[in-house]
Amino acid sequence: MEAIAKMKNVPLSERKMRFVIDSIRGKSVDQALNILKFSKREASEWAEKLLLSAVANWENKLNNVHSADDYDLYLKTAFSDGAGSLKRFRPVPHGRAHRIRKRSNHLTFIVANKTAVEGDESVAIDNENTED
């Protein structure tokens, strides 16, 4: 079972965000949260909020019957896409102007479980397809 969380228009460049995202992709949720918590980068604060939201979405899919701690959740997919950028001008000498681009990005996390959940039909469907 998977849960998706998205955060749009994060006011950081996608390049800075990808540096943090690459360090946690594929890791367990507990390990990823530890990495993000002790990172000095600003991008880790945004990613930590989104990861907690993805875990909450996973629990809400099961009507809060099961706890995320029991099912060995991991970060299946994590990526950052570019969003719009604010364009500003800064005065420079000789009456000229330089453009400043304040970039932003969209974040997407997909969290999945390694341990099977009771009553999850998607696992049963996958097992039927592999037997053929």
Image (cartoon, rainbow, N blue to C red):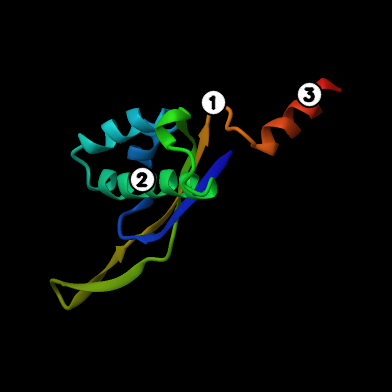
The mark closer to the camera, 1 or 3, is: 1
Q: Position of residue 52 (x, y in %)?
A: 36, 45
The one of 119 and 1 positioned closer to us in this rendering: 119
Using the image, determine if residue 58 lies above or below residue 118.
below
Farthest-out residue, bottom = 95
Q: Quadrant of the C terminus?
A: top right
Say left or right for 30 vs 128: left
Tag 3 residue: 130
How far is disc 2 from disc 3 in space, using C-alphas? Answer: 33 Å
Q: Residue at x 38, y 50 (%)?
A: 14
Occupied quadrant, residue 28 = top left
The one of 64 and 9 positioned closer to us in this rendering: 64
The number of numbered badges drawn on the structure is 3
Q: Residue at x 20, y 34 (%)?
A: 38
Amino acid, disc 1: Thr
For marks 2 and 3, the one nearer the N-term is 2
Using the image, determine if residue 103 lies above or below residue 69.
below
Farthest-out residue, right = 132
* Res 66 visible: yes
How far is disc 1 from disc 2 in space, using C-alphas? Answer: 19 Å
Q: Residues within 10 Å of mark 2 (few under 14, many from 20)?
A: some
Q: Residues within 10 Å of mark 1 (few under 14, many from 20)?
A: few
Tag 1 residue: 115
Tag 2 residue: 52
Q: Secondary structure at mark 2?
A: helix
The one of 125 and 88 positioned closer to us in this rendering: 125
